[in-house]
Amino acid sequence: MTQPDSHKLSLNTATVRQRWKLDQIIEGCARHEIRGIAPWRDQVQALGLKASARLIRHHDLILSGYCRGGMFPGSTPEERREKALDNRRAVDEALELGAPCLVLVVGGLPAGSKDLPGARQQVRDGLSELLDYARPLGMPLAIEPLHPMYAAERACVNTLAQANDLCDELGDAGLGIAVDLYHTWWDPQFQQQIERAGLRRLLAFHICDWLAPTTDMLLDRGMMGDGVIDIRGFRQAVEAMGYTGLHEVEIFSQNNWWQRDPDEVLAICKQRHLEFG
Amino acid sequence: MTQPDSHKLSLNTATVRQRWKLDQIIEGCARHEIRGIAPWRDQVQALGLKASARLIRHHDLILSGYCRGGMFPGSTPEERREKALDNRRAVDEALELGAPCLVLVVGGLPAGSKDLPGARQQVRDGLSELLDYARPLGMPLAIEPLHPMYAAERACVNTLAQANDLCDELGDAGLGIAVDLYHTWWDPQFQQQIERAGLRRLLAFHICDWLAPTTDMLLDRGMMGDGVIDIRGFRQAVEAMGYTGLHEVEIFSQNNWWQRDPDEVLAICKQRHLEFG
């Protein structure tokens, strides 16, 4: 079991967004020599797209992905059309920022619906349409399977197998998978499905830890080492496939990490990445 | 979409256990003309095994399963041995009660462990050993895949495919699956895996609803109709495989159903089973 390359650490800005705005996060990453960053759209909007791109370049940071597009299902054609247009804007922004991919949280059931297969079909259709836009522009789309506990409200793509199925169906060009261990560590098919994905589809790799017990379904993610995920084992499995990209840390933590001084959080991220990543 | 047979309703006693002891629950089921019941071991112990069996027979109730065995993984051989002996006692009790199967919640990671494949191997080994005991006695074991959000602490068998794999490996005689919609509704392989299971492996069918949002990972299950699960569709899919067994309602609900008068809960269970089951 080897230590990870410390230069591969990337910070998803959600990890410290409660206390720092995007410019502070960018400067914080530079100060802590964290080379990668994954900004969220609303923060980019607040700072300004061009200003964000400029500041990221100024500090020699690189993106591990742009957060995020998706949320394809909708109750009406109009709602889906709105989402489609917004997703195209997300592709444009990702291009301006020089992101390696636009991460997609695909969305769950439309309001009032119990039709999960139907929602999955809407995801397929919305993704296909977005691909038509993103492919010629050269912006890869990364499907992020979310934990099954988010199937109703956030993403009805819940396994790596489903993401691979979508890639099979829609074609590999400009399409791949964001592997987030928080969402996939339980999956008995993890190894089999990253082998099926192969290097070409492995567009992003996200880490944090699963706390036992977990007290909140959304906002109680753990820092690497504080939970039960064999992060090092999974990281080595992904790198054994040839993955050489960044290791993006994304921690939603209402009662712990979001309460702390972000400089402390970044320092601990670096240390825990080396120790457990 | 046809209504379910109202005589197929069964009550998992956890649904009203906060306010009623087992004898009250048995009498309550009889009073509400709920024909099936699935008692928990600790309640049976409190009332007495023979007294429980007698009272259930007296009221002409039938069991949909006995709750529960499993919890196979352990940190030490001694711990696993203790669990094995306890599981054998659970088989004996299930026989005395005339249960159609012993439901198995297989257990998660041993304390301090991050070795999920290892825990799964321990489940396989523990299950194999318990089968050696239960098979000659004629007590079927029903593997219940639990939602992936319980992988660390309660059950590392999280998909119907895993349960089918275990049945393939250990042999079908006296072994099958308890399909609980709360745990499996999100599974994109649901239909494929119940077809793979076939009638022989479908030993139990549990229903309740997934609330959106869900506010607690353990104790916020919904009454049928209050959430997003297409219960009727799934029930018909299972019955299309030839399943003619009971529909067991199991609702853990700290802040809603557990606070209500159990007579009200039972009446609503009956009504919602007809409407949404």
Image (tube, coloured by chain):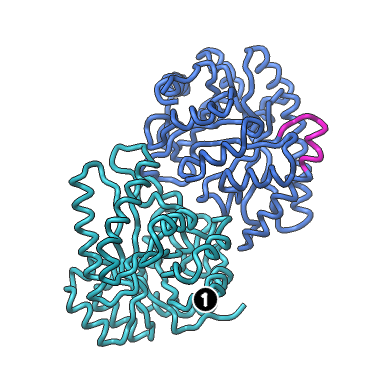
Chain colours: A blue, B cyan
Classified by dominant secondary structure, the portion drawn in magenta counts as helix
Closer-to-camera residue (A246/B225): A246
Total numbered labels: 1
x and y percent of residue B112 in the render? 30, 37
Closer-to-camera residue (A76/A136): A136
Judge from the rendering whether residue A81 lies leftward or rightward of residue B242; answer left or right.
right
Whether the magenta-drawn stretch holds residue A148 is answered as: no
Judge from the rendering whether residue B93 lies leftward or rightward of residue B163; answer left or right.
left
x and y percent of residue B46 in the render? 18, 69
User: Does residue B131 lie above or below A9 as drawn?
Assistant: below
Q: Which residue is drawn at 34% across and 86% down?
A: B31
Residue B18 seen: no
Residue B11 image-quadrant placement = bottom left
Instruction: Determine the chain carrying the residue at label 1.
Output: B
Residue B185 seen: yes
At label 1, counting other C-alpha atoms closer than 10 Å, the crowd grade (few under 14, some 14-19, many 20 or more) is few
Element assignment for label 1: loop
Closer-to-camera residue (A84/B65): B65
Judge from the rendering whether residue A189 lies leftward or rightward of residue A174; answer left or right.
left
- Which residue has dot 1 on it? B242
User: Does residue A181 lie above or below B227 as drawn?
Assistant: above
Q: Residue at x 60, y 31 (%)?
A: A204
Q: Label 1 amino acid?
A: Gly
Residue A176 image-quadrant placement = top right
Q: What stretch is highlighted in magenta?
A: A130-140
x and y percent of residue B32 in the render? 37, 84
Whether the magenta-drawn stretch holds residue A131 is answered as: yes
x and y percent of residue A108 in the render? 62, 52
User: Does residue B227 lie above or below B31 as drawn?
Assistant: above
Residue A133 image-quadrant placement = top right
Quarter that holds the N terminus of chain B: bottom right
